[in-house]
Image (spheres, grey):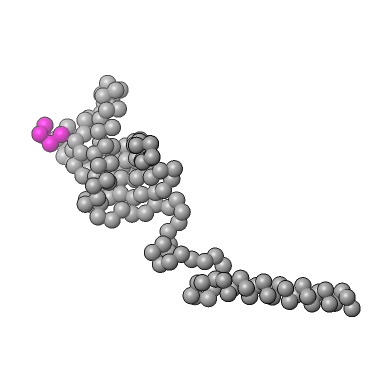
Amino acid sequence: MARQLLMLLAAVLLVAAASAARADDDDPSGSTGIRQPDSAYRGRKVGGRTEVRNVEGDEEVQRLGRFSVAEYNRQLQQRGGGGGIMLEFARVVSAQRQVVSGLMYYLRVAAVEGGFENGGAGERVFDAVVVVKPWLDSRTLLKFAPAATKYA
């Protein structure tokens, strides 16, 4: 008899705990599980990339594009030219931002080989990856290479 009473008590506690967990869930869809943040953050993942809107009007993104071209040119000069051609920044055409230990920017940068005034070979598109750590006032160019596909 005591054993049956103990099992009944355990079952009642289990049902009470489950209903309390459901009552705490504010999800309007009524589904169980982890609560979802408000609609502004739905679909975002911690550490996931997000598109930067209005890239051409975003001063920080354009500044980072200019930095990436300047850093590429500086590294090219340090290597003694190494078969590369100096570039002149034109604009950033697309960008994504990712929160890491700082901010990582994935930029698609348009640049002119040889510069505008030197009759450059035309505008080319490059992929650049820049890490920004604002608290250290640091920017680091991790990658700068011709884009795999031409930007349309």
117 drawn magenta? yes
106 drawn magenta? no
Quarter of the image for the N terminus: give it.
bottom right
Which residue is at 24% across, 39% downward? Answer: 66
Which residue is at 38% across, 40% downward? Answer: 135
Position of 117 compared to 72: left or right?
Answer: left
Q: Splitting the image into 4 quarters, where does residue 83 fall?
A: top left
Q: Is residue 125 visible?
A: no
Tally of marks: 0
Which residue is at 43% across, 66% downward? Answer: 38
Tell me where residue 49 appears, x and y as whole percent.
Answer: 39, 52
Q: Can residue 60 be seen in this view?
A: yes
Secondary structure predominantly adopted by residues drawn in magenta: loop
Residue at the outermost front position:
135
Rendered view: 84 above or below 43: above
Rendered view: 15 above or below 116: below
Of residues 14 and 147, the one nearer the viewer is: 14
Q: Splitting the image into 4 quarters, where does residue 2 fall?
A: bottom right
Tell me where residue 30 appears, x and y as whole percent.
Answer: 53, 76
Q: Splitting the image into 4 quarters, where does residue 100 fall?
A: top left
Position of 110 compared to 4: left or right?
Answer: left
Rendered view: 78 above or below 116: above
- What range of the chain is rendered magenta? 115-119
Position of 60 compared to 123: left or right?
Answer: right
Of residues 30 and 12, the one nearer the viewer is: 12
Tell me where residue 25 appears, x and y as whole percent.
Answer: 55, 71
Which residue is at 19% across, 36% downward? Answer: 88
Tell me where residue 35 appears, x and y as whole percent.
Answer: 52, 66
Residue at the outermost right position:
1
